[in-house]
Amino acid sequence: MTSPRSAKVVLRLASDRTKNPLADSGPDSMTRQAGVAGAGPGIRQERQQGARGQAPEMLSLRIMATTDVHANILSYDYAGNRPYFGQGLAQTASLIAAARAEVPEAFLFDNGDFLQGSALADLAAHDRRKRVHPVIAAFNALSYDAATLGNHEFNFGIGVLERALQHARFPVVSANVLRERGPGPLQDGTFVPPYTLIERALPDGTGRMRPFRLGVLGLTPPEILRWDREHLEGRLDVRPMLEAARAWVPEMRRAGADLVLCLAHTGIAESSGGLDSEGLATEIAAIPGVDVLVAGHSHLVFPHRAAALDPRIDPVEGRLAGTPAVQPGHAGSHLGVIDLVVRRDGVGWVVARAQVRAISVSEEVAGLSSGLIRRNAALLRHAVGNDHRAALAWTRKPIGSTGRAMSTCFAQVSDVERCV
Ligand SMILES: [Zn+2]
C-alpha cells in the first residue's frame, strides 16, 4: 500500500488538499490516503497519461457508494451504550475524504436503507418538529450526489419519509415506487423522481473541461408493499424492478445521459435461475444501457474472493453480466469505489476501463490516527451532534428494574427476518 508506485498519488494529494476540507494535513494521512484509496495500476496509469496528453476523447471519473447505512452515523452502539469501531459513516468519512482527494471529480451515492436502524432514526421518526432528519443532515454534510430508496425507508410511514426528504440537498430517485400507475412505466406517477442527470465538467486528455452527464436510476424492492403494508396499502404501488429499469434506462439515454448508473436496492444472487427481487442485481446489470451498478440490501460485500456459482458473476473483478458493480456492505462498513475511464464512441460515451473495489473500514481506517478520524468526522459530529446527545439521553434512561435474572440470548431472533 505504500509501494513506490503510490508515491505520485501522495504528491497529488498535497496539491488537492485545498479542495477538500475533510482531508488531513499530516504526513501520516498522506501515506494512508494513498494506500486506502489509491486507484489501481490501470486507472492510475490512465490518469497519468491524461496529465501528459491522454487521448482527448477519454475522461476519468470516480463513483463512490455506500449502502444499507441504517442510520449508523457516529459509530455508536446505542443499545449497548458504547462506541464501536468498523462501522458508521463517521469512519467511512475517512475513506470518502481520501478517495475524493485523489481525483479531480468524484461522485458519492447511497443505495438505500438509510432511514432506519439505530436509536438516532427511531427518535427522529417520532420528532414532528421541522428539523432536519439526522441521516439527511449527515448525507448533506458529506455532499452526497444522489440516493435511492430501500425498503426500510418506508418503515415509519410515508409522512416521516417525506418530511425527511424535504431537507435533502441531493436528489432521491426511485423508478418503481408509484403514487399512480400508468399504462406503462414511463407514464407512471412516481413517488420520487425515477432518475436524475448530474452534469459535471470533467477534464479530458488535453486538460479541456468537457460537460458530462451521469444518469442515476433508482430501484426499490417491490416487497415494501408486503413488509410495510400498514403504511402503504392503498397509498403507493410498486412495479417490478426489471420492468421499470428496462423502460427507464433507454429513456435516460434519450434525455441526455452519457452513462447510466443504477442504484439497485437488491442483492446479488450467487446462483443463477432465481428471480427473487431481493437478489436481482445481476439481472438488472444485464439490461442493455446499464453501465455501472451499485447493489445492496443483503448487507454483503462485492467484489470478494469467493467463487460464484453464476457464471455471469465475476467476484474478483467486480462484474455482473460484464457490468462493473459494487456492494459496499452495510452500516458504513465499506466504501464502494468504481473508477471508470470512458471514451467517446461515435455519438456517445462508453466504459473503456473500470476498476471496482469495496474498501473496508475495519481494515483501512484501523491504521489511521484517532486525530485524523476525528477530523474527517467533524462535519458529521457537527451535523448530528444534538440528535446523538438526545439519543444517548433517551437510551440511557432507566425504564424500570427487576430482581429476576434476564437473558438477551434470543433478543435478535425474531428481528432477523425483517431486518435485512
Ligand atoms: Zn433492504
Image (cartoon, grey):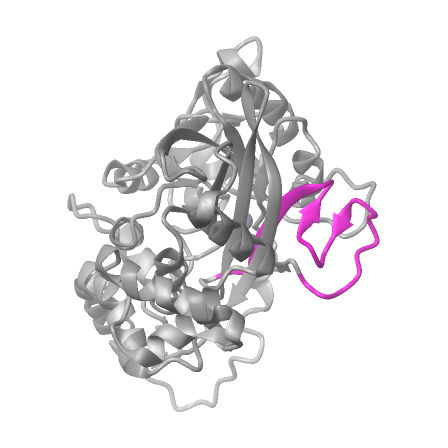
Q: Position of residue 295 (x, y in %)?
A: 58, 47
Q: Position of residue 321 (x, y in %)?
A: 74, 40
As drawn, 76 above or below 347? below
Q: Name the residue at 55% across, 16% down.
A: 185
**Where is the C terminus found, in terms of image quarters?**
bottom right
Q: Is residue 370 visible?
A: yes
Q: Position of residue 30 (x, y in %)?
A: 36, 73
- Name, please, the residue furthest toward the front: 52
As drawn, 195 above or below 94? above
In the image shown, does 228 or 242 lie closer to the viewer? 242
Q: Position of residue 107 (x, y in %)?
A: 40, 45
- Name, please, the residue furthest toward the top: 183
Residue 20 located left or right of residue 272: left
Q: Taken as a whole, is the magenta stretch helix, strand or loop?
A: loop
Residue 320 located left or right of residue 337: right
On whether residue 307 falls in the magenta region, the answer is yes
Span colored in magenta: 304-330
Q: Name the residue at 75% across, 37% down.
A: 275
Which image quadrant is residue 153 in?
Answer: top left
Which image quadrant is residue 168 in?
Answer: top left
